[in-house]
Every structure is written in C-alpha cells, then in structure tokens.
Image (tube, rainbow, N blue to C red):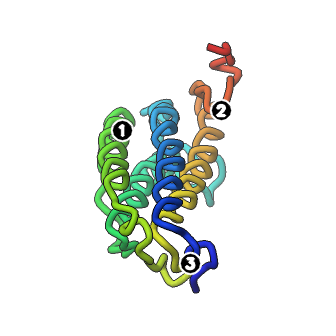
Amino acid sequence: MSTATSQTLSPEIAQAYRDLLLGKIESEFKTTARVIAAVPEAKKDYKPEPNSRSAWDLATHLAQSEVWFLNSIADADFAWTGDPPKPADTVAGLAAWFEKNTTAAAQRVRGLSPQQLLKTASFFGIMNDAVVLYLLFAHEHTVHHRAQLSTYLRPMGAKVPDIYGGSFDEPFTGQ
C-alpha cells in the first residue's frame, strides 16, 4: 500500500522534509538521553504495573529503536532480525551509547541524496512509502516511549527532566 503523499514528493520536497524533521529529531536527542539517564540504577527493574515493561527494558527499547529507525531509513530496509544485544549494562552506559549512536545514525540519514530519500521501503507490510516519510513515524515512536519512561521517574524517586517546558523538578526558566 503506497500513499498519495509518497507518490507526489519531489526531490526538493523530500530533501526539505528530511532537513526539517531530522533537525527536530536531532534537537530531541539530548532530552531523550536526559530522560534515560534519570532512571535510578538501583531501581531500573521498576514496573508501574505487572504487565508493563521495566524501566530498564523501556529505556533500552527507546535507545535501540531510535538508532534502528534512523539506520533503517538510511538503509531503505526495515528488516527485523530479532532483538539486538543490550548495548550497555548500566543506565549511564545506555545514555552514552544512545548519544553516540543516534548522532552517527542521523548523519547517515543527513547524507542521503534526494533520490535515496524517495526510495520506497516496506515497513513490515503495514506501510510502503518513501523512506523520508518514516522520519515522522520514528519521531512519534520516540516521543511516545520517552513519555512512558518519564512517567516512571517520579515513582522511582527520580527527578523528571524538562522535556517540552518545565517540570516540577526542573521549572521552566525561559532561558
């Protein structure tokens, strides 16, 4: 299934869309890393409810999926080969891994030509669009899981970072 949007993208629009969305995604990296880093090491097994992921599982999924999405866009291939090995054993290690690997993956996407951005790829048979259009889906996926993880922080005794404006723990200062 292909959308009309994918079929009507010009190379110039694909490049502008990539630059706009990737700029937004890159500006969010530090915030996401701060939310991951706020997970207390001693409480990373916390679950708000038995059917929930643990804070550690959620943080690891958040970190790995951001990198996977960007690399999949760069490769024009969303093949899933199973859960990759955990990138770190500690919260600090995961936050550092996230920052390093998201930056590298974003650079790969930034280096795509307009023709590469327009290459069509299937997303598990659910969608079949120009790879540039998956940037919004990747961003929304990250925001969704980062929000989930941020709701775990206070019950674990951690401070909630400023995400889109102040929080009780980090009030908005306007600077």
Which of the marked residues, 1 or 2, is nearer the chain's N terminus?
A: 1
Q: Amino acid at mark 1?
A: Glu
Q: Amino acid at mark 3?
A: Gln
Instruction: Give the CA distance from mark 1 to mark 2.
Output: 19 Å
Q: Quadrant of the C terminus?
A: top right
Q: Position of residue 2 (x, y in %)?
A: 57, 82
Q: Nearer the viewer, mark 3 or mark 1?
A: 3
Mark nearer the N terminus (3 vs 1): 3
Q: Residues within 10 Å of mark 2 (few under 14, many from 20)?
A: few
Q: Mark 3–mark 1 contact, CB under 8 Å?
A: no
Q: Quadrant of residue 80?
A: bottom left
In contact (CB < 8 Å): disc 2 and disc 3: no
Q: Quick one: SS at disc 2?
A: loop
Name the residue carrying label 1: 99
Q: Which of 154/100 is in front?
A: 100
Q: Dot 3: few (<14), some (14–19), or many (≥20) neighbours within 10 Å?
A: few
Single out the mark in the foreground, 2 or 3. 3
